[in-house]
Amino acid sequence: MISFTFPGQGSQRPNMGAPWVDHPSWELVTDASEATGRDIGDLLLNADADALSITRNTQLVTFTMSMVILDAIERLGISPAMCAGHSLGEYGALIASGAISFEAGAKLVSERSEAMQSAAHEFHGAMAALLGISDADAEATCHEAGDHVWVANYNAPGQVVIAGLSDAVAKASEIARSKGARKVMNIPVKGAFHTPYMNSARQRLRKALSDTRFYDLEVPVVANVDAMPHERASEWPLLLATQLTSPVKWTQSLAKLAEMGARTLVEVGTGGVLTGLAKRTVPDLDAISVATPDDLDKLVLLISSQSSFTPQIEQHQGEHLYISERMVVASQAGIFEPSEALTGSLGSSNEHVSLARISVGQPLGTISGLEVRSPFTGELMGMIAMSGERVTIGQPIAWLRTIRES
């Protein structure tokens, strides 16, 4: 089974949107900008490292980049059996699972980032990563350092992040070294995230969450707060609010995904941080990062080697593999009607449209009146969804053989 995992703050990179500008999924950047009133495209393409390190920018660009990549993966007909997200990434996981709409998720992330940045200004907070130390020793370190520092992230075996007031974090760092921590690294943030010092942000976020419509999940999402799967809409407003002042139990969440039957962990976003953590925590599972369009073919090859998802692969010159077939998938739920231009000559049947040439952006039909356009150029091998069929987001509706230009 496939699990999608979504990275959080810290995976951002300058110019990380550039590889996706010409991909059809880039249109989500415009949608996110309209939903939030921010020019996210400019941040993704032009902001420097300092600008991206500002919380209100960091969270928006990281979230939006994950959504672009999620959309690109869904266009291939690949969907998860379960999801999880690291801190901010939990919002991406909820969108992938159908719990909230993309627009609602973008607005929540915008409010969350503003609330956390505001809360960070109230106290002189800091965070530090402790490497080569057990969870128990990290917890004991914080206890010995006093009442103003806590474990904020359980990231992987031997990798824990602490947070709190700056002086308390510095004191805990020295104690951690005395307990055998191999390395202590200050994290370049000015806030004590996932500690009680985010309480004002939690209160502000709760209002936004109460105004957001949640739906029962199509696939479970393992929550940061308790490392348990949750599928009911009613559970998530409290889980997301609590997350701001509670540690991220990522080590435990990865173990839970494995226990639930995950075989492949797909990191949906840039940075590759979660892929590295997964390889340390659950080394028996396949972990892959999808950060650029080139990674999409790597993902398809990995999944096709494991399961019944078997797009046709052509090999040339004994060196390179090329994906020669693609699935066009539904971008929304509703009733599908194929294009009459493609099916008119077939009477009442639309099961096999013979090698019609399709261009990028060409309509293949409609879902509840909204056009479904092909993201690929190729030969239409067949319509998978039937006229009048109710389809769900990510469901394959057409099968194309891509045309490789010589």
Image (cartoon, grey):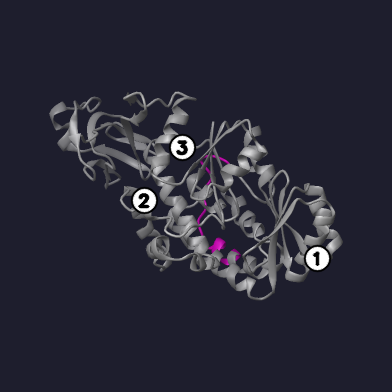
Residue 11 at what x, y percent from top left? 54, 54
The residue to which callout 3 is attached is 79
Which residue, as the protein is rendered here, is positioned at the far bottom? 122
Q: Mark 1 or mark 2, which is nearer to you?
A: 1
Q: Are marks 3 and 2 in contact (CB under 8 Å)?
A: no
Q: Confirm whether the magenta stretch covers residue 213.
A: yes
Q: In the image, what residue occupies the spot 37% across and 55% down?
A: 18
Q: Is residue 100 left or right of residue 334?
A: right
Secondary element type, mark 1: helix
Mark 2 — residue?
A: 20
Image position of 163 (left or right of 68): right
**Mark 2: which amino acid?**
Trp
Foreground of the two, 376 or 44: 44
Work out how far the residue at label 3 is from the one at label 2, CA to CA, in angstroms: 20 Å
Region of the chain picked out in magenta, as a range: 206-221
Q: x, y (%) of residue 140? A: 84, 54
Query: Residue at label 1?
Result: 171
Who is closer to the viewer here, 388 or 97? Answer: 97
Q: Amino acid at mark 3?
A: Ser
